Amino acid sequence: MPIKIQRKGKESSHSLVYRFTKAVQESGILVRVRKARFKRRNISGGAKKRTALRREELKKEYEKLQKLGKV
């Protein structure tokens, strides 16, 4: 749904821009675009498991280095 704003008679450019921004705000286009822009993808079950296993490995390695006094 495109927004069409036309200049009325001797309307100034400032009031035209003001009317346009109001129309965009009232239409809710910006809200939908911002939600879509920062939407996170769903991660598959396998990917979740792999990242969890990777975290556990790094945690064990860190604990090992901590016991050796290298961290």
Image: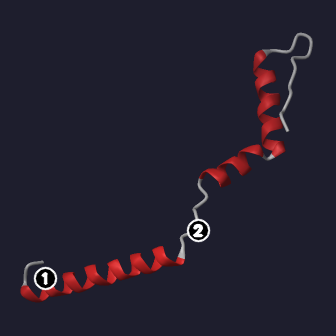
Tell which residue pokes out farthest to the bottom in this image.
Answer: 67
The Cα–Cα distance between marks 2 and 1, rounded to whole angstroms, is 34 Å
Residue underneath mark 1:
65
The structure residue drawn at horizontal position 83% and vertical position 43%, both measured from the top left corner, is 27
Coloring scheme of the render? Answer: secondary structure
Give the residue displayed 81% in from the left and 36% down from the top: 22
In the shown orientation, is residue 59 left or right of residue 43? left
Check the picture and name the quadrant holding the C terminus: bottom left
Q: Which residue is mark 2?
A: 42
Residue 43 appears at what percent x and percent y? 54, 70
Q: Residue at x 76, y 33 (%)?
A: 21
Query: Residue farthest to the top?
Result: 10
The amino acid type, in three-letter code, at marker 2 is: Asn
Camera-side mark, 2 or 1:
2
Identify residue type, mark 1: Leu
Residue 50: x %, y % from top left: 40, 77
Q: Is residue 24 above or below residue 49?
A: above
